Image (spheres, rainbow, N blue to C red):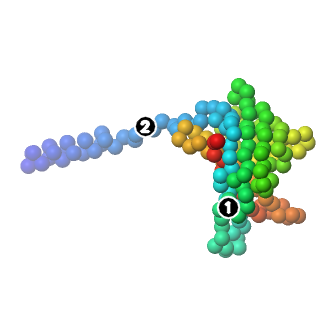
Amino acid sequence: MKLKIFFSILSIAALAVSCRPDKYEVMSIAEKPVDNLTGTWKLTKVIQKDEQADIKASPYVSMDVTNLLPYNTMSIRLESKDGVPTNFVVTPGTAPQVIKNNTGKWLINDPKQPTKARFINGLDTTYIDINSYPRSFDNSFELKVYKYEQPSGKLAQSYTYQFTKQ
């Protein structure tokens, strides 16, 4: 009987000691996202999403439109100096327009964890969300553009453009 009590107490003590939360380190964000974005990128995938599909109860929420139009003929070169964005050059090929201008400067909202980019040429600016940026395990990044209904201003569609390093 004493042996049973001893093993019961020992089991409870072992469980109590083993029930501490693990210490997880925070996953590091890309150390230098601007440097990782610098280079020449080819457009490899385009996803069109109906942002009002839930309201319409439509089963057609999103669709890969990469091969419907010649999107894969577009590439973009992003330049930077000392971790600061400088110039961009778009080679549109025969792809539909993604960025208004083919040349100019580009800016981001946060150098450590960018979520928005601006492509500027004179007074023309294209605002684009950065969905993801390249990491050591993924050599691609995504830009997302939103389209709004006129004149209501309601969000209608979004396009997610995936670029892969050349």
Which-is-in-front pick, marks 1 and 2? 1
Residue at 43%, 37% in the rendered image: 23
Mark 1 and mark 2: Cα distance apart in space: 46 Å
Say whether disc 1 or disc 2 marks the residue closer to the N-terminus.
2
Residue that extends furthest to the top in the rendered view of this protein: 82
Pick whichever, 142 or 97, lies toward us: 97
Is residue 133 among the parts visible in the rendering?
A: no
How packed mark 1 is, by other alpha carbons closer than 10 Å (few <14, some 14-19, many 20 or more), is few
Q: Amino acid at mark 2?
A: Lys
Tell me, for residue 67, which label it has, or none: 1
Residue 17, x across and y down, in percent: 30, 39
Q: In the rendered view, tell whether residue 65 sits above or below residue 121.
A: below
Residue 15, x across and y down, in percent: 28, 44
Residue at 67%, 61% in the rendered image: 67
Tell me, for residue 23, which label it has, or none: 2
Pick whichever, 39 or 13, lies toward us: 39
128 lies left or right of 4: right
Residue 76, x across and y down, in percent: 73, 43
- Asked if marks 1 and 2 touch (Cβ < 8 Å), the reply is no
